[in-house]
Amino acid sequence: MSLRRTLGPVRSALATRKGALAGLWLALVVVVAVLAPLLTPYAYDIQSLPDAFRPPAATHWLGTDEFGRDLLTRIIYGARTSLSVSVVSIAVSVLAGMILGAAAGYFGGRLDQAVTVVVDLTWSFPEILVALILVAIIGPGVTGTMVAIGVAYLAQFTRLTRAQIMTIRSETYIEAARSLGASDGFILARHLLPNALGPVLIAGMLATGDAIILEATLGFFGLGAQPPLPSWGAMMSSGSGLLFKAPWIILFPGLAVATTVIAINLFGDALIHALDIKTRLREA
Amino acid sequence: MLLSVENLSVAIGPVEPLSGLSLALDRGEILGLVGESGSGKSLTALAVTGLLPLIGGRVSSGSVSFDGVDLCRLPEADLRGYRGRRIAFVTQNPMTALDPIQRIGDQVDVVARLHLGLGKAAARARTVDLLASLRIPEAAAICDAFPHQLSGGMKQRIVIAMALAGDPDLIIADEPTTALDVTVQAQIIHLLGQLARDRGLGLLLITHDMGVVAQVCDKVAVLYAGRLAETREVGQLFAAPAHPYTRALIGCIPREGMAPGSLSGIPGAVPSVATYPGGCRFHPRCPRAAEPCRAAPPPFAARPGGGMLACHFPLEPADA
């Protein structure tokens, strides 16, 4: 039943034209990232200096970089880094934010004050700054990036969940549930969180797009995945000095970031519409 | 006695919006608790279910005895076992009393699963029977519907079904028809009345509508500004109201053959907790008020013709 409830909105999101297009692109990126070793004729880390700076051609569809590595291969492997880092960090961030926000919004009191202070504090810094500080503390690499991105977006999900819970907790059906003998835990799990879930999931979806950009930014500064592991941000960084000599080195990873983020945002939009249960049933 | 409220007072912070309330209700009996908005009707319901802390209130004195157990002394964890299982609550507004994103069946099932320990299939079978017994057509199909697909009257039946699902002994219905169309109000009231008789439930019907009281109740308690004005058997009350406030309330019911414009209201408004007048709280609005009414509150005492009354100058049957 919960599977049907989750898949329903996704299916209706895919039924719209922009949702279908965005979903198709995201599916392609995911499949390609998962099947990377099977799809790529080259290794992402073997350098071959004679092949350096080759423009896009039949042998190297997207050209080669300054070390002669196939750009398409590296972009495909870079998708693995980008997607896994952003999806994992946002998923953990959404989960932690919902727990914190629900506890603060439902129980109130000192807990709420403490959570609100911390959230407002992180909220007042740009995400990139929070992430940079954290990477500086933890050290660069995939794990550091995940933690940094997760914490950078935590305030957003905590705040949203808290606001949702505070609105819903005063609804009559919560009072009704309580008058029929429901406990705090039951009310939270069965009524409050499910009703608060929609907007938080949408925010999480849209934040995943931002997280890809943040991951690329950290990579651009050399703080993300470390070489030879490819990341879109690091590839753009190495291409930025070669803009006039070999513009494809920065162009294609940039396009990868842009199209993926646009697709996530479009799909998120379609999902917002589909999650509105009333609209969906009226149209059905 | 199933429910016996003795001298109950409720305090919220420094104020006491409900004082010295006494009620008695037996199985199969319907007690109407009547009063204008702000008279303390809903507070009574919260006090009986132990939910006062939700609005920052507490029982400051008196007792609520349910089937011999004083609910005011029970810890929250034990009270939870009473709510829904022995005492059920029908809320004021059925439009918002159901979780909008859960299917009807799941919401009703959960009460029996929680309180009676039934499995998924058994709870559903029970729900379908219950809905059918409340004359809900196509009960099985309704179980798969979402609340917004149902009409107001149908939603109120579902809310009543949820209240009945735990097989309670007492149902408290707080203005169960206020948010409904006039055309379905009578249906719901009769349904509740019938349930109380057929299942031997005690029904505490909270309302401001004397017409509803006349329809189904056995006994009436009239509440004004946090104090009881009068409690009587319903026939006697309507035949010969003894408290001027009761008579004024009855005067607010439209009747056949009334001259246009003769429907009366009660001048003034219910005072708020902060501005309760001294003496009898009704005296500023009372046509019979005299010096004693301003000086001291009348005692709430048994009166010769039966019932209890708090008035210095009660109406005689001839006055009514």
Image: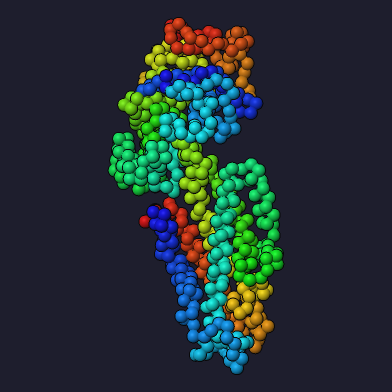
Asked if residue B127 shows in the view, the reply is yes
Q: Residue at x 57, y 86 (%)?
A: A46
**Could you say which is closer to the camera, residue A175 or residue A273?**
A175
Total marks drawn? Answer: 0
**Above or below — where is B72 with respect to A78?**
above
**Could you say which is closer to the camera, residue B162 or residue B91?**
B162
Q: Residue at x 51, y 49 (%)?
A: A193
Quadrant of residue B53 within the rendered picture: top right
Q: Residue A216 placed where, x, y %? A: 61, 72
**Above or below — where is A97 with respect to B260?**
below
**Could you say which is closer to the camera, residue A19 or residue A134?**
A134
Q: Residue B144 placed where, x, y %? A: 35, 48
Q: Residue at x 30, y 38 (%)?
A: B129
**Above or below — where is A103 with respect to B45?**
below
Q: Residue B136 placed where, x, y %? A: 31, 39
Asked if residue B288 shows in the view, the reply is no
Quadrant of residue A215 within the rendered picture: bottom right
Q: Residue furthest bottom?
A: A50
Q: Residue A166 placed where, x, y %? A: 57, 45
Colour mapping = rainbow
- Which quarter of the rendered picture does the N terminus of chain B lie within? top left
Q: Residue at x 53, y 31 (%)?
A: B75
- Which quarter of the rendered picture does the C terminus of chain B lie within? top left
**Could you say which is closer to the camera, residue B134 or residue B4?**
B4
